Image (tube, rainbow, N blue to C red):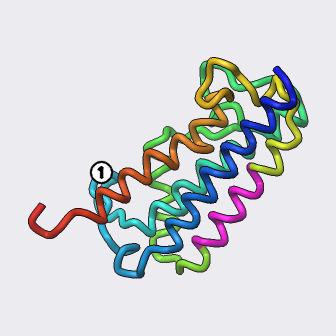
Amino acid sequence: MTEVARQRAIGVLEREWHDMDTWLRSLSESDLDRPVFGEGPGWCVRDMIPHMAWWQGLAGRVAEKIAAEGGAPDQRGSRAFVGITLSGDEQNAEIFKTWRDRPMSDRWALWLEAHSRMMDALRLLRPEQLVRPDGPEGMHPYFAVPGFVHLRNHRGDIEAALKETATT
């Protein structure tokens, strides 16, 4: 595992987020209000922003802990590694409830802060702490999944929501 591989992984995460950020910010207010049915009752496109930010923040917290203490998440997963006891569904419901009535300016600030924190923390890691040749895009899943796989999946969900009409 090399420094080149580490820098490549960091570049992938930066590009994926930047592409998503540019695309999301291009959406209109009416686009942001479109329902995203697959996420649960009441979820709109605007609700996806703090949701994705929270999961990027999780990757940042994992990276911070690895950089400070060593070790890595075991089979219990990243949430347990950093002391989060809620299940994924419970966590998502909590994020939705917390952010439901917050203005877009707060959501954008969280989105940027979570990504920046994640990237700052990832830059502290040694190659062997970030890179895994058989992992998604050559990185450990506990960074790849919240860092870019999650964004790609939700972009598809949002694109589908933007195409739906009242009759579909």
Residue nearer the viewer, 165 or 55:
165
Picture coordinates of residue 30, whole percent (x, y)? 35, 80
The residue identified by callout 1 is: 38
**Residue 108 magenta-drawn?**
yes
**Image quarter for residue 161?**
bottom left
* Residue found at x 65% / y 51%: 15
**What residue is at 87 percent from the left and 30 percent from the top?**
3
Give the quadrant of the N terminus.
Answer: top right
Q: Quadrant of residue 80?
A: top right
Which is the main secondary structure of the residues drawn in magenta? helix
Task: Name the residue rendered at 38%, 51% in the picture.
Answer: 156
Counting from the top left corner in percent of width and height, residue 117 is at 77, 54
* Figure disc tally: 1
**In which quadrant of the rendered image does the C terminus lie?**
bottom left
Q: Residue at x 70, y 25 (%)?
A: 73
Q: Secondary structure at mark 1?
A: helix
Q: Is residue 38 left or right of residue 104?
A: left
Amino acid type, callout 1 = Gly
- Span colored in magenta: 107-118
Q: Position of residue 138 (x, y in %)?
A: 66, 27
10 with respect to 22 (left or right): right
Does residue 131 appear left or right of residue 55 in this picture? Answer: right
Measured from the top left, where is residue 69 in percent x and y?
Answer: 89, 31
Q: Is residue 122 above or below residue 45?
A: above
Residue 93 highlighted magenta (yes or no)? no
Which residue is the extreme one toward the left? 167
| 124 vs 62, nearest the viewer | 124
The crowding category of the residue bearing disc 1, from other C-alpha atoms within 10 Å (few below 14, some 14 to 19, many at least 20), is few
Q: Is residue 126 left or right of residue 27?
A: right
